[in-house]
Amino acid sequence: MKDFFVSYNRHDRAWAEWIAWTLEAAGYTTVIQAWDFRAGGNFVLDMQKAASEAERTIAVLSENYLKSRFTAPEWAAAFAQDPTGEKHLLIPVRIGACEPTGLLGPIVYVDLVGIDEAAAENVLRRSLDENRAKPEQKPRFPGGESSQSDRPKPVFPPSIPSNLPPVSAIFVGREEELERLHTQLQTGDTVAISAISGMGGIGKTELAAQYALEQRDMGTYPGGICWLKAREDLGTQIVLFARSHLELAIPEDLELAAQMAYCWNHWRPGNTLLVLDDVQTYQAVAGVSVPQRSQFRVLLTTRLKLQSPVQDFEIKVLSEEKAIELLQTLVDRDRPDLRLLQEVGDLDTTKQICQWLGYLPLGIELVGRYLARKPDTSLETLWQRLQDKRLEAKALKAATREMPTPLGVAAAFELSWQELTPPAQRSAALLSLFALAEIPWTLVEACLPDMDSEDLEDLRDESLLTLHLLERTDQGMYQLHQLLREFFAAKREQMADVEQLKRSFCRVMVTVAQKIPRTATLDLIEQLTPVIPHLKEAATTLHSCLTNEDLIIPSTCIGRFYMGQANFVEALSWRQQCVEIAKERFGFNHPDVAASLTNLAEVHQAQGLYQDSERLYNGAFYILERLLPHYPDRRGIFLCVAATSNGLANLYCKQGRYDKETELLYQNALTVFRQELGTHHPLVATGLLNLGNLYRLRGCDGEAETCFLKSLKIREQELGTEHPDYAASLNSLAVLYHSQKRYEEADSLFTRISNLNRCSLGENHLRTATDATNLAGVYQSQERYEEAESLLIESLSIIAQQLGEEHPDIVVPLNNLAMLYGSQGLYSKAESFFLQALAIAFDKLEEDHPCSQTAFQNFLRFLLEVIQEQRTDELSDDPLTQELLRQMQQGEE
């Protein structure tokens, strides 16, 4: 059994090793994590074994030790065995200023604070002396390996010369960075230079100071740790450090350069760390002339991205978890009466605050200390103040004296802003107009057409990126930090050409929006997705800067983007907003209001809300009819009337209304499209397709086929044979062929369409579901039941996922699946799907709707077959089934 288990926090490793070495030199045996725990072992089990197998425990007391959650169980185990202290099983050794409380408070500790190494060694040994008979000569180790006592004696931590600045007592979320930084600094056989870089407020200086403090306490740099302010004369600082901390007698009659050379030549032996804080240029570093010896390690903090031979060590913002932990720690430390996260709502608000701050350490610390000194300020009040005053909020401006950096967020950013040239400042101001999302650089170039693209790249690469005011996230993609965006926005509003910048941004966004098609392929969706957040900025924050002609374009096209993906919640939101902003600017009687109502009606129709949709279409017609006689833009009015007529006719078809009124609406729309857009415009193809579908539903196959072929020809010429809209025209023709029992032709077309749409639109698109239903119908006609069943189940899954399980569009595949099972004699399964189809049809559609009638007639034929087969016992007790069976068996209609 060992004599002592040395319990310590990792920040105090140097002290723990010195204590263990001193004890072993005095003849004791020790267990210490740094020497005895091996890679691959289980840390918790090793710690438990060490504590239980040692007679006594030494607790290396410091602030770090007392705050650690992991050291408490170690000393608590020893305390539990000797609560009165009679056996001296727990021996606290204080190595730094701290005040033990609780159960540790009454225990007398060994105090090594403020004394030199010889005195510390004497105090430690005497405190443990129990009149042991220690031999005068060191006994020879009987084993074949070197003993632990033969290892080099650790450096006595307080003897390491250093001039570190004050550091925060609270340091959270950078443990991994500290380890990586240390690893990077140890590479190389000559002087290693690493630069902690990052945006203002990211915590560069604090990380460097915490690293230096940790490594000083661990004894890593016995040659000293010299902290230098890079904005002041470095040579003078080095000479002063050497005189006061290394006690070098530097000749006074030498020039400063010669005095520096003398310092380097007579520097204390051992690894040495030089920290240059707030470096502005690499020339400042080169002027120090650090000897090319592996003894020296140079650590810089800088807002710049420096090149070789400097190794960059860029630090990012905190994770959400670490940001919340830092905020909580700051509040808990200074206001133990306040529990920041008492309820779920508090956590949500805390997350909101941390997210708005962009997880920037300086912002988190300022807010945390603000809360700590404001006992009556709630999280909700703070959040509201931040939203009202942004960077001007007091919580982000007033640094406290406990903070190493005496700057607020805006003041920290101002230092970098002053480094920018006016063109670079203008570019930064433009960037603040974009959403808080990745920014495609092509959009930035489009917003500044008067600038040469290469010159703009230089501003980006040599100013904004170099100063960490912009982050490159991917090829051609960049992003601003949340608070930098706020800062640049405030600067933007002070510029003389601010309105010009906003108008330029809006023009570019309108141009991009107009390129969004009604049916977007997967490739197009991938291309457009990064642009959508910035379109939203134009449609919301900056809609007042849009011209009258462009006002509704961004929100309309955003709605179109979401409609194409069946994201009706988003589509509805944007099209409702479109109506509101149009009414706000133009009043009710304006073509853009009518167009917005038509677009909104389209969303309701897709959701199966047919009455709401019809009401909106009629509202649009009401406006247009009042404007037609006198509105100057006759072409715009006519096109708006045509779009509304087309939409209303589509709605009537969905409702099973295949009458002359529906045909007239389609004909009128088609006439306007041809007159105003030309005979080969894609909208003419759409009008022909709609009219052809109506003819097919009315049984006019010849007229339907003529329309479909014309539509196909236009779309082939204008869009190509791989476009989804070409596939839509092809699909209508295939449906016609199937209804005419031209199964081989229908099979070939449906297979081609399905492959095209799966490739271009994706496996979960609504058109893919329609394709699966159609192809299943052909397979069912050919008695390919297993293939048909698989396709119908796939179709049901897609529709349920995209539209919901109660949407009217699900009736057809449910009905088809029921018929499929019925044709195979699977009567119980068939009945179940018939009943589902009928329940939705009768609830969501009129009873005389073609879908309702078709499903009902198919169910009657199914029941008749079941009666004829004398298998009614396989059916359920459903009231509708039983009532229909009773009537049919009695010969009733």
Image: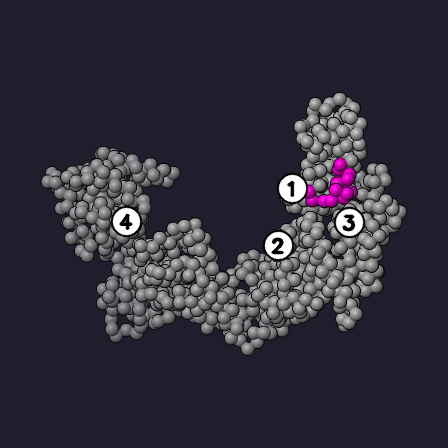
Q: Amino acid at mark 4?
A: Tyr
Label located before the other in sequence (4 or 2) = 4
**Labels 2, 1: front one:** 1
Query: Can you say whether 520 is above or below 458 in the image?
Result: above
SS at badge 1: loop
CA separation, marks 4 and 3? 76 Å
**Labels 4, 2: front one:** 2
Q: According to the image, label 4 marks what residue?
A: 65
Query: Can you say whether 830 is above or below 94 in the image?
Result: above
Q: Amino acid at mark 3?
A: Cys
Relative image position of residue 14 (x, y in whole percent): 27, 50
Q: According to the image, label 2 marks what residue?
A: 570
Residue at the extreme right of the image, as rendered:
702
Q: Is residue 391 left or right of residue 11?
A: right
SS at badge 4: helix
Magenta-span inclusion, residue 871 = no
Task: Tell me the crowding category of disc 1: few under 14, some 14 to 19, or many 20 or more residues within 10 angstroms, Cα based.
Answer: some
**Labels 1, 4: front one:** 1
Label located before the other in sequence (3 or 1) = 3
Q: According to the image, label 3 marks what residue?
A: 653
Relative image position of residue 597 (x, y in whole percent): 69, 60
**Labels 3, 2: front one:** 3
Residue 698 visible in rendering = yes
Label located before the other in sequence (2 or 1) = 2
Q: Nearer the viewer, residue 750 or 627?
A: 627
Label located before the other in sequence (4 or 3) = 4
Assess whether mark 2 and mark 3 are in contact (beta carbons under 8 angstroms). Answer: no
Which segment did they paint magenta? Answer: 843-856
Task: Tell me the crowding category of disc 2: few under 14, some 14 to 19, or many 20 or more residues within 10 angstroms, Cα based.
Answer: some
